[in-house]
Image: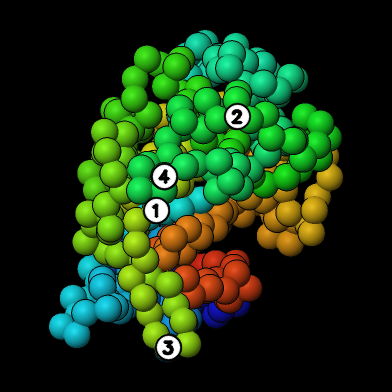
């Protein structure tokens, strides 16, 4: 495709030069040839080709169980967006999914929690190498820093396993503060010494949400709305909160319900007492809001580029299975300059991919437990057979 594009551009230049010389030699008026429009048509053709590639990939995935919404963008242009399937698969009269539907991001929420911590760091309100007990003195474990939490190197125990054993009434929400109180009382065994190795663990980002609250003096959901969602124009994004709920509702009050997939068919996922814990999950957003956030990162709207870049630095010296972790983003040796995260929690799966080298972005949000295949989606994002020319306003 690169060779074809080169020859098309070369042909256009030959036409322009030939027409100009002929006009001068024949003393005829040289017709005006709008080269910009020719290049625009070429870009339009490439956009259409890339959109066709995307539609082929995701239509095939929808035939194999993808029930969700997709947005793909390149060089500042939304190339492809489409909704596949239904909001509530348990209904006989099913409502079609829409592009502006909000899904739970599950673990993809972590990149936003990390951004909140980075923002507080930039304002001088915390340091990455501070002991977490500076902000959560009840924590009964020594030597754990904010950086260890960000990079999943704390060695702390899993809060969900602890709650499954010790939370007496699962009809009541389990919260971040309840988690910290239980850690102080029960002191479950750690998985390893701080900074010994990488161990992906939701407790790290749940504790970071509490750090945000105690440093800022705001509720986590309010801080996220005021400092990140609203400045980025993310009008459909929010943190689901059961903070003031006396009991766990049967279902979350949302338009798009999560579903567990069984051989007998989909079952709408009920609300869960662990959904009261924030920071590691439970953010809701749309593909278009995620695209706005990606543009905000490009434009350094939240943080200067030098500070934002820290999110994409490998946090561990070792690379397990050729993967590493920055601040809320995963990294892969196989796909350098691609930063991503998968989410999976209580009936939802999601994928967010950011290709910094080619300025590409992909968001896939689903409301089932059907796997989003990494190899297929990453091969699509990294495919260079069709590439849009760099945007004039883009400065890498």
Labels 4, 2: front one: 4
Q: Is residue 204 visible?
A: yes
Q: Residues within 10 Å of mark 3 (few under 14, many from 20)?
A: few
Quadrant location of the C terminus?
top right
N-term-proximal mark, 4 vs 2: 4
The residue mark sitting in front, 1 or 4, is 4
Q: Which residue is mark 4?
A: 169
Q: CA distance from mark 3 to mark 2?
A: 39 Å
User: Disc 3 vs disc 4: which is toward the camera?
Assistant: 4
Q: Is residue 11 left or right of residue 26?
A: right
* Residue at 67% over, 47% down: 200
Q: What residue is shown with label 3?
A: 264
Q: Gap between marks 4 and 2, in whole Å?
A: 17 Å
- Whole-angstrom CA distance, mark 1 to mark 4, is 12 Å
Task: Please report whichever mark, 3 or 2, sits nearer to the chain's N-terminal start.
Answer: 2
Task: Please name the residue that numbered disc 1 is placed on.
Answer: 272
Q: Secondary structure at mark 4?
A: loop
- How far apart in space, not on screen, are marks 3 and 4 (Cα)? 30 Å
Expressed as whole percent of the image width and height from the top left, the position of residue 151 reads: 67, 37
Residue in view at x 79 percent, y 59 percent: 321
Query: Which is nearer the N-term, disc 3 or disc 4?
Result: 4
Cα separation, mark 2 vs mark 1, equals: 20 Å
In the depicted view, which residue is nearer to us: 294 or 202? 202
């Amino acid at each position: 495709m690169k060779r074809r594009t080169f020859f098309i551009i070369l042909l256009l230049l030959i036409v322009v030069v030939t027409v100009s010389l002929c006009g001068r030699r024949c003393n005829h008026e040289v017709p005006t040839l709008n080269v910009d429009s020719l290049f625009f048509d070429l870009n339009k053709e490439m956009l259409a080709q890339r959109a066709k590639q995307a539609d082929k990939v995701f239509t095939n995935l929808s035939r194999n169980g993808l029930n969700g919404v997709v947005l793909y963008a390149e060089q500042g242009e939304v190339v492809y967006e489409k909704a596949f399937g239904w909001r509530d698969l348990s209904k006989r009269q099913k409502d079609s999914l829409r592009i502006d539907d909000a899904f739970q991001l599950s673990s993809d929420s972590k990149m936003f929690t990390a951004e909140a911590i980075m923002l507080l760091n930039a304002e001088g309100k915390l340091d990455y190498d501070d002991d977490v007990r500076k902000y959560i003195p009840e924590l009964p474990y020594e030597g754990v820093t904010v950086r260890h939490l960000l990079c999943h190197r704390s060695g702390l125990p899993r809060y969900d396993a602890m709650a499954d054993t010790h939370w007496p009434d699962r009809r009541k929400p389990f919260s971040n503060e309840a988690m910290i109180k239980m850690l102080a009382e029960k002191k479950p065994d750690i998985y390893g010494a701080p900074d010994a190795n990488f161990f992906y663990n939701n407790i790290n980002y749940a504790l970071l949400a509490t750090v945000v609250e105690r440093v800022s003096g705001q509720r986590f959901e309010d801080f996220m709305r005021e400092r990140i969602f609203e400045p980025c124009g993310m009008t459909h994004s929010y943190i689901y909160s059961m903070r003031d709920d006396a009991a766990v509702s049967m279902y979350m009050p949302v338009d798009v319900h999560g579903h567990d997939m069984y051989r007998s068919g989909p079952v709408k996922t009920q609300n869960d007492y662990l959904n009261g814990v924030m920071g590691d999950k439970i953010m809701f957003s749309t593909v278009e809001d995620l695209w706005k956030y990606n543009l905000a990162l490009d434009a350094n709207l939240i943080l200067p580029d030098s500070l934002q870049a820290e999110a994409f630095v490998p946090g561990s010296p070792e690379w397990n299975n050729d993967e590493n972790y920055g601040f809320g983003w995963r990294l892969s040796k196989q796909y350098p300059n691609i930063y991503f995260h998968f989410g999976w929690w209580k009936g939802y799966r999601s994928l967010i991919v950011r290709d910094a080298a080619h300025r590409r972005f992909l968001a896939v949000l689903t409301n089932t437990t059907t796997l989003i295949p990494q190899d297929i989606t990453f091969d699509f994002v990294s495919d260079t057979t069709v590439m849009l020319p760099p945007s004039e306003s883009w400065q890498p």
